[in-house]
Amino acid sequence: MEKTLLSLNEVASKLETVSEPALNKWSESLQGAVSGELLEYFKQRIHFVLERMDRGFAVELSMARGFAGCEELSSHVLLLSEKDYWLVKDELSKAYKEQIQLLPLGQFDKRTLERRVDFLIDVLEDSVAANLISALFRKSEQLEAEKQNVRKTLCDVTRLLEKDRQRLAFDLHDGPAQALSSALLQADILEDLIASAEAKRELASLKSILGQCLQELRSSIYALKPQCISKKGLATMVKAYAKQFSSRTGIKVELTIESKEAELPEVYEINVFRVIQEALNNVYKHAQATQVVVSISFSEATLFCSVEDDGVGFNAGARSRRAQGLGGYGLASMRDRVEQFFGTFNIDSQLDRGTCITFSIPI
């Protein structure tokens, strides 16, 4: 039986001597099969591993240290197909073992070196994997930081928009609404002073127009700042608004909370409430419905909501008033509010079968 003639250090040294011709042969065999940048990446990685063989490289590799430029080049590895990946490995092993056979050594030492090549390739795989994982973790941390910045910006924007809504509501209440109320009062006084039946009819028509304008203005003021929006908790806000909506429109609203309510940041509560509010307003304006079912549920990471009415529905291809209403500003506003929180928004509607709006938001 042959004895080992080479020490571990000598094995590493011999591999170093055959490395350059082996890598050149390997590059030639893979020309056109994979990208030149990928080959260069693997070459640098192989040198990196060879320099650290038998010198406690495991800890260094696990921490993905000591290799410049790995993050920029590692993406090429992710794009490798399984077929090309095995081709790279097989050709690498073949090139090294061909060079080993040219060394003036005994067969036992050659087999030792060949086994070391197999070990080198295994370590190379671990090195690349550790490098990729490290790069992915770094990228994940960057994306999470960017995500938090986006959320903070959205929160700031929502707060500003709500303040603008409140200011506009107060301005409308103290300005046009008060003016319309005064005009109606003066019309009442004029009615007592006018004797002509025709003038009274015209005045009655004017009072009707003023009254309708005042009612619509008050509805707009309420929509801008409903009393319930100051209440704590999404379910509480929606329940209070649903009650007021039913009283104002005569449309029955059934609210179901299908799981334990999750505690949400205020900005989430306000935006979800505004989507439900706009959906209910669409029902009132366009659906000719008698009943609406609002469902809210919470999973560990997602809020789900649906608003379903029993109204006339609409055909997406038809240019009906109902379709135009849902396809206009109200729908765009709802969709934007959901999507700015990385959620999904859908509408399902058929003629004479009502409409169901569903959306979900990650929480």
Image: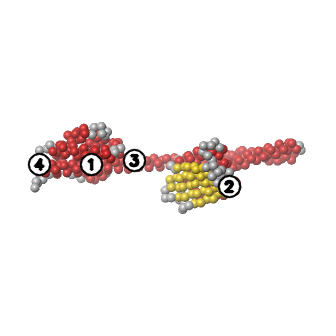
Report helix, strand or loop for mark 4.
loop
Q: Earlier in the sequence, mark 2 or mark 4?
A: 4
Which residue is at a point 67% across and 57% down the rendered structure image?
252
Q: Earlier in the sequence, mark 4 or mark 1?
A: 4
The span from disc 2 to disc 4 (Cα, nearest Å) is 94 Å
The span from disc 3 to disc 1 (Cα, nearest Å) is 22 Å
Task: Work out whether residue 263 can be spotted.
Answer: no
Of 49 and 35, which appears nearest the observer? 35
Which residue is label 4 attached to?
106
Residue 290 image label: 2
The span from disc 2 to disc 1 (Cα, nearest Å) is 69 Å
Which residue is at a point 20% across and 40% down the rendered structure image?
21
Graded by Cα atoms within 10 Å as few (under 14), some (14 to 19) or many (20 or more), the crowding at tag 4 reads: few
Q: Which residue sits furthest bottom?
A: 260
Q: Earlier in the sequence, mark 3 or mark 1?
A: 1
Graded by Cα atoms within 10 Å as few (under 14), some (14 to 19) or many (20 or more), the crowding at tag 1 reads: many
Which residue is label 3 attached to?
139
- The amino acid type of the residue labelled 2 equals Thr
The span from disc 3 to disc 2 (Cα, nearest Å) is 52 Å
Which residue is label 1 attached to?
124
Report helix, strand or loop for mark 2.
loop
Q: Does residue 215 appear left or right of residue 362 in this picture?
A: right
Report helix, strand or loop for mark 1.
helix
